[in-house]
Image (cartoon, grey):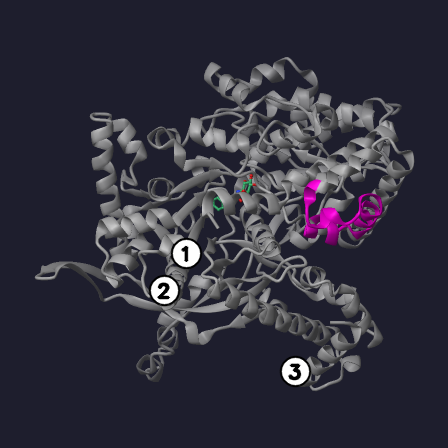
Amino acid sequence: MNQKTAAARLEEKCKLHFGCPLNSATNQQAYKAACLVVRDILIEKNMLFQHRNVEAEQKQVYYMSMEFLVGTSLRNNLYNLKLERPFENALSAAGINIHDLYEIEPDAGLGNGGLGRLASCYMDAASSLGYAMTGFSIRYEFGIFKQKIIDGWQMEFPDDWLNMGEVWLQARTDESVEVRFGGHADEYMDEDGYHVVHRDYTTVLAVPYDMFISGYDSDAVNKLVLWSAKSPKSIDMGAFSRGEYAKALEENTRAEVISKVLYPADDHIDGKILRLRQQYFFVSASLQSIIARHVKKYGRLDNLADKAAIHINDTHPALCVPELMRILMDEHNFGWDDAWQITQNTLSYTNHTIMSEALERWNEGMFREQLPRIYQITAEINRRLVQELQTIYPGDVAKIEYMAVIANHEVRMANLCLCACHTVNGVSKLHSDILTNSIFRDYYNLDHKKFQNVTNGIAYRRWLCQSNPELCELLSSLIGNGYLKDARKLESLLEYQDDPSVLASLRDIKLKKKIALRDYISKANGINIDENSIYDIQIKRLHEYKRQLLNALQILHLYRQLKENPHLEIPPRTFLFAAKASSGYFMAKQIIRLIVAISNTINADPAVRDRLKVVFIEDYKVSLAEIIIPAADISEQISIAGKEASGTGNMKLMINGAVTIGTLDGANVEICEAVGRDNMFLFGMTSDEVEALWRQGYSPLSFVRANPALRAVLDMLTSGVLGARFDDIANSLLTNQYGVADAYMTIADFEDYVRAQNLVSETYKDAEKFARMSLINIAKAGIFSADRSVSEYANNIWHI
Ligand code: 26W
């Protein structure tokens, strides 16, 4: 397609959909027309790709995830299809600026954070590499909430993304499937053997919507299938006639609420019925469609595992286990043992968190009531598991209970995945080690071959090439274009680490991106920041273990130092935060309030003007990350060691030339291996040291007593000097009121963090040295490509 054909297609869409020529279309109309033209191309490519795969009896991967944080699609698809220029020119000829259209597109924010974005990065990589992968999730009517900070407090507003985002979806109403909830599962025997009938259930219709996922310079276009819930009954006319309007719509509402909104929590399970219903809804619909497709093609199911790999992204889709068993046994007459074999050989599971409060567990009674047949199967899985464990560990009641799927009136989804999946993996070397040494140790001892590591990776063509074209232009001029398909080729950049003109160009580009972010912040926050200051950036979900609080305390310390010693020679610094807190997470919201208060106090203080600024940027999301990341000098990755499974923001920042200040946690360990200790700012306890300090008995107060500067900072939390008091935060650090004081050891790591921050300031004074560190980070980021991760999954787990 060239500019001329692009123009003709745009013109045609505009006429057919809006009854006007392109040059008199509104930007909204032009945006929709552009999306529809691109979607047509993707549909066509997808049909060809699917056809080829079917002919070749290609094994398919099905990636099951409650979350896909897609972000925006127009620019991504044009980039992948190499159609940016033709579209830009065709639109421009009609008086339309393509960048204005990009701004109209809302993020498809169908996820909370790392796990959801990872799923999207993997879809992108699979398409780029030509793997046949279908994603399955829910078409949430409202994605992750929009965040506004009002009087320092996070407020949540609905994210009505479909209004402008629905153009990407293609409804396949004809292929709707039924999902059954509630009722009773009755078992009986007759001459043919054992049977089950599910009676008195309520049906919800699952309507599939396809979103097409392109790959870079690739023939492959895959699909993300998003299920929408619909009531099979329209309206209760009887109730309506009696004037009972709410009642007339009751069943409708109950069904359709399932796909209404994404759960905005990634910190704890709250065991809500609706979330369980969401999970079963999308798992059952997806498996029914996978199985129907397989049977249609092969006419049998005993070969399912040879032709399909079904991947469970964290435990949220763990109901795949009993649901696949149900379909095989109840609908296709397999016996238990054969069904179990097929199930095990087909399913694999990735764990993304070791936070025990985020490991999903369901109340047994509720589970049974909502999903009676699924409960029966799960209970039978548990019965057989416990029986087997009793022969292996006779009398070891504690171990068997720990490993059981159902215990203490709870159904535990991680154990369900551990016993049923052929492969289980963590998402960084350290995380995978922690899984096998601690929380999943017993399962590891039972069958260590099951466990693997696949270190996370990112869709770097989005995070580097699309969001930082200026940097890519420089890279291409130096090392050619090979890195666009093979990220490891970035390593050739190392040749230029001592080339002053290259280092100067890198600094120029960084400055340009810093100016762009400065302008965004000035518009969005009304705060003016200095592009010549160090941009020190912490962007991620707000969680105590990620320790935004440690950063905040360190800023207060720096502020005090600058006030006490106005001649202190440090480069000016701008600390930037962006983070959403789970709506019910009180302490996380308090930490946001603290950061905002620090920002207000410091930015208004003439004593530190031009030397120190703090900004909390509202409404963190994929498209905002794309603006922030290229502008970062320093990447804050400061979680307590052992708790961040991997982190992926660390990789996005690194590949854009930011230098990491961080602990040896998650993938930071591998970043450190790649760049060397000299090219990042390491600090803090290792995960072993954290463990040791816990065992020994951790007392934050003893650290505070030994550090008067820290004492002074903590006093600022409660004295009111920040314009408000933060007693809850101070208490969480210092008193034992909830069982532990300072559960994330912020106090213990404070001193070493301050040391590392001082080193950042010192190092930055040598502009060339800092630019060299930045270059080395870019050059060594190639292993963190999602292409590498997805190839590992494909070779070692999915066997495609
Ligand atoms: C309460 C339900 C719940 C529990 C956990 C919702 C979501 C979660 C996720 C597992 C949280 C998450 O996003 N984990 C992140 O996954 C990334 C991709 O592997 C990792 O890079 C992050 O370290 C990890 O926190």
The answer to the question of whether label 1 and label 2 lie on touching residues, with beta carbons closer than 8 A, is yes
| Type of amino acid at the residue the image marks with label 1 | Lys
- Taking depth in this image into account, of 68 and 736 the one nearest to the observer is 68
Q: Give the residue number, with chain letter if any, for mark 1.
A: 307
* Circle number at residue 343: none
State the extent of the magenta-drawn residues as a range. 461-488
Q: Residue at x 57, y 51 (%)?
A: 122
Residue 762, horizontal then vertical, whole percent: 82, 24
Q: Position of residue 257 (x, y in %)?
A: 43, 64
Marks 3/2: CA distance?
40 Å
Q: Amino acid at mark 3?
A: His
Question: In the rendered view, does 205 fall on the left or right side of 13?
Answer: left
Q: Residue at x 48, y 60 (%)?
A: 138
Main SS of the magenta part reads helix
Q: Examine the structure image and report whether residue 477 is included in the region drawn in magenta.
A: yes
- Which residue is tagged 2? 298
- Label 1 vs 2, first from the N-terminus: 2
Indicate if the residue with disc 2 has its beta carbon within 8 Å of ligand 1: no
Question: Alpha-carbon neighbours of circle 1 within 10 Å: few (<14), some, or many (≥20)?
Answer: some
Q: Is residue 736 above or below residue 195?
A: above
- Amino acid type of disc 2? Tyr
Q: CA distance from mark 3 to mark 1?
A: 40 Å
Residue 145 appears in view:
no
248 or 535: nearer the viewer: 535
Residue at the spot 31% in from the left edge and 32% down from the top edge: 402
Q: Secondary structure at mark 1?
A: helix
Residue of label 3:
17
Q: Earlier in the sequence, mark 3 or mark 1?
A: 3
Label 2, residues with CA under 10 Å away: few <14, some 14-19, many ≥20: few
